[in-house]
Image (spheres, rainbow, N blue to C red):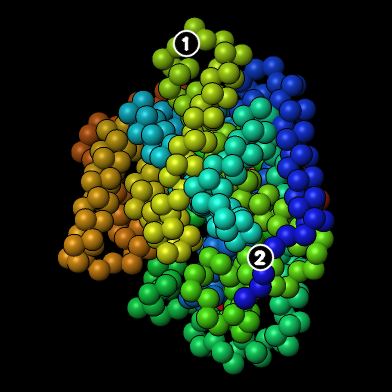
Amino acid sequence: MPDFQLGNLDIGLILAYFALVLYIGIKVGGSHKNAEDYFLAGRGMVWPFIGISLFASNISSTTLIGLSGDAYASGISVFNYEWMASIVLVFFAIFLLPLYLRSKVYTMPEFLERRYDSRSRYYFSILTLIGNILIDTAGALYAGGILLKLIFPEFELWSIILVLSLCAGAYTIIGGLKAVIYTDAIQTLLVLIGAVSVTWLAYDKIGGWQAVQAVTPPEMLSLVRPADDPSLPWTGLLFGVPILGFYFWCTNQFMVQRVLSAKDEQHGRYGLLLAALLKLPVLFIMVFPGSMARVLYPELDNPDLVYPTMMFDLLPAGLLGLVVAGLLAALMSSIDSTLNSASTLVTMDFVAKAKPELDSVALMKVGRITAFVFMLLAAAWAPFIEQFGSLFKYLQSVLAYITPPVVSIFLLGVLWKRMTNNAAFFSLIVGALLAVTMLVAQSQGWLELHFLHAAAWLFLACTIIGIVVSLLGQAPELSGKQVCLWHPDMLKEDIQRQGALPWYQNYLVLSALLLLATTALVVTFW
């Protein structure tokens, strides 16, 4: 095992990074004039920053530590969550993005109210807030905490997490979404430098891929696993992973908020496709290192220690500090994103409606206070994640039970004009009760069900409920809701508009090329 110590050069680089992001937060924060500036970067963000920020916010909690650890323990099938994201993001770009931008909403619960009513909005807003704090922010804080615990073993995990949350919260509270997006660009660069460096040095040290194959069962080097596989069965990949992906990328406030900040639809679409493209190399630079670690460290007890162990064992001084800064940057990217989105939800979904007399400047102040409170709540919960064994499994298993009802009503609401307000709310409530029932049954040993299969069954049940209740009731009044409904004519218009552009600017052509690249990658490692 390596000595988890940082030299003066490494520490200096890390401190320089934190000083830079704090400076950006203060600099950007001083330019905000109203709530739209603070929460949505003035709706003027261009596609490179949108795509990079989407990627950066995602990689903090589900890659590096999470993916490499799961690849070490279970195999490369964990990459299925990553390539599936490219398909989901193409769907987002074609069907959902124009609806979101044309509706001019601040939050995803606000979009649900536009399509249905306030009951669905408040339910989803509360659910999203819980997910932001207990899953996203706390998960990222925990991942950062276990890394810093290795470096500073004399400190308790909770105290490390508290300091980390204060650092991430500082520039987020001051700078808002624009500061989050700009710092994400720096964070992505550092993360990619670190991931490529660790992968290259690990590959060189083990002497080639044959060393991995010699110590790893063949099924652990395959993306598609049997239906009875305990980690990620092919049935779960086909029916469960898309549901989690749709929720995470298409309805989760802390991801969609970046898209809502887009300058226009074309910038939003290019940003989504850039994020999807960046997900594909994750197999080589973030999943395969976990497989290589099986050769280098066969006796590791905690899979979440795989990536930190490789960093300190393989990287020289200077580069180690840069990569540690990159890893902390990736973790903080998720923290800043979720804090900003949580404050947006509370401010725009609750405070703005309860206190309509508040002006835009006052709402911005409320958002900053809310972000600070949520920062403390996430820091308090994060140490308990250690009890779940694997960070990645914690994130995915929790999502599998709380997200299917939401995904169901979003899809039905956008694609089917007959879906009613009562059907949406009834689906949400019954779906939540079914999820709790399934969790209790599993905890008592009465039910054995993979969490991805649970997600699929919950989605199916909620979809049937939504359709049946809608058909039994009166057809909904669609006045004012057309902006939330997708129609085939929208795609026809897109084809005509995009056809006038060069192929490399036609998002439909780029989407097709992306899907071909994704298919080739999956087939190669089938």
Using residue 102 as the reference point, say whether residue 46 is left or right of it: right
In this figure, which residue is indicated by the disc labeled 2?
A: 4
Judge whether 493 appears above or below 225 on screen: above
- Mark 1 or 2, which is nearer the eye? 2
Q: Position of residue 510 (x, y in %)?
A: 71, 56
Crowdedness near tag 2: few (<14), some (14–19) or many (≥20) residues, C-alpha within 10 Å = some
In this figure, which residue is indicated by the disc labeled 1?
A: 356
Q: Position of residue 94 (x, y in %)?
A: 59, 47
Q: Earlier in the sequence, mark 1 or mark 2?
A: 2
| Residue at the image position 72 percent from the left and 32 percent from the top | 25
Identify the amino acid type marked 2: Phe
| Residue at the image position 41 percent from the left and 52 percent from the top | 384
Q: Position of residue 292 (x, y in %)?
A: 63, 79
Tell which of 430 and 155 is nearer to you: 155
Instruction: Determine the secondary structure under disc 2.
Output: loop
> Can residue 270 be seen by looking at this rendering?
no
Crowdedness near tag 1: few (<14), some (14–19) or many (≥20) residues, C-alpha within 10 Å = few
Quadrant of image for the C terminus: bottom right
Identify the amino acid type marked 1: Pro
Quadrant of image for the N terminus: bottom right
| Residue at the image position 59 percent from the left and 92 percent from the top | 214
In the image as oriented, which residue stretches furthest toward the front? 154
Instruction: Determine the secondary structure under disc 1.
Output: loop
Tell which of 65 and 100 is nearer to you: 65
Using residue 118 as the reference point, say whether residue 499 is left or right of it: right
